[in-house]
Amino acid sequence: MNEVEEYLLTFKDEKRDVLFFLHSFFIEEYKLVPKLSYGVPFYYLNRWVVYLNPDNFQGVELAFPNGHLFADQFSALKSRGRKMVRSVEIHSLNEIDTKDLQQFLDAAIEIDNRFKKK
């Protein structure tokens, strides 16, 4: 068990289920590398692709550090007063639309690949 999984185990019930679903999705489907940074799980390829913030929300904040570069079609993602980060709050597994999640991740990875060292 890695440090991110140990951290996720500290949460209870629905929040933990959402966290583990997203964690597994990022690792298994996209081969992202998890790491605790700033006290929350971040997932990397070349740089930060996505992070999960379960602390300051009733649900889990699914956040994209470069979300400001996403196309306008991702209106479900909100800035919450931030210049770069865009996010959505998830309260239960039933709220997760894997098709939307894949679109968010595909866009985030496309942006991340622009920062790849040549």
Image (cartoon, rainbow, N blue to C red):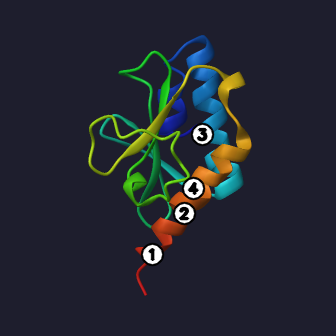
Label 1 environment density (alpha carbons within 10 Å; few <14, some 14–19, many ≥20)? few
| CA–CA distance in space, label 3 to label 4 | 9 Å
What is the C-alpha distance between the residues marked 1 and 2?
9 Å
Alpha carbon of mark 4 to alpha carbon of mark 1: how far?
16 Å
**Could you say whether the residue bearing mark 3 is in a helix, strand or loop?**
helix
Count all numbered tags in the image, as a single digit: 4
Q: Could you give the CA–CA distance between mark 3 and mark 2, rounded to whole angstroms?
A: 16 Å
Give the labeled residue for mark 4.
32
Q: Residues within 10 Å of mark 4 (few under 14, many from 20)?
A: many
What's the amino acid at mark 3?
His
Provide the secondary structure element on which disc 2 rests.
helix
Query: Would residue 38 be found to the left or right of residue 46 on screen?
Result: left
Q: Is residue 89 above or below residue 100?
A: above
Q: Earlier in the sequence, mark 3 or mark 2?
A: 3
The residue under label 2 is 109
First along the sequence among labels 3 and 4: 3
What residue does disc 3 label? 23
Q: Position of residue 69 (x, y in %)?
A: 41, 61
At 50% from the left edge and 63% from the top edge, which residue is drawn? 45
Do callouts 3 and 2 mark residues in contact (Cβ within 8 Å)? no
* Mark found first going from the N terminus, 1 or 3: 3
Q: Which mark is residue 114?
A: 1
Tag 1 and tag 2, C-beta contact below 8 Å = no
Q: Which of marks 1 and 4 precedes in the sequence?
A: 4
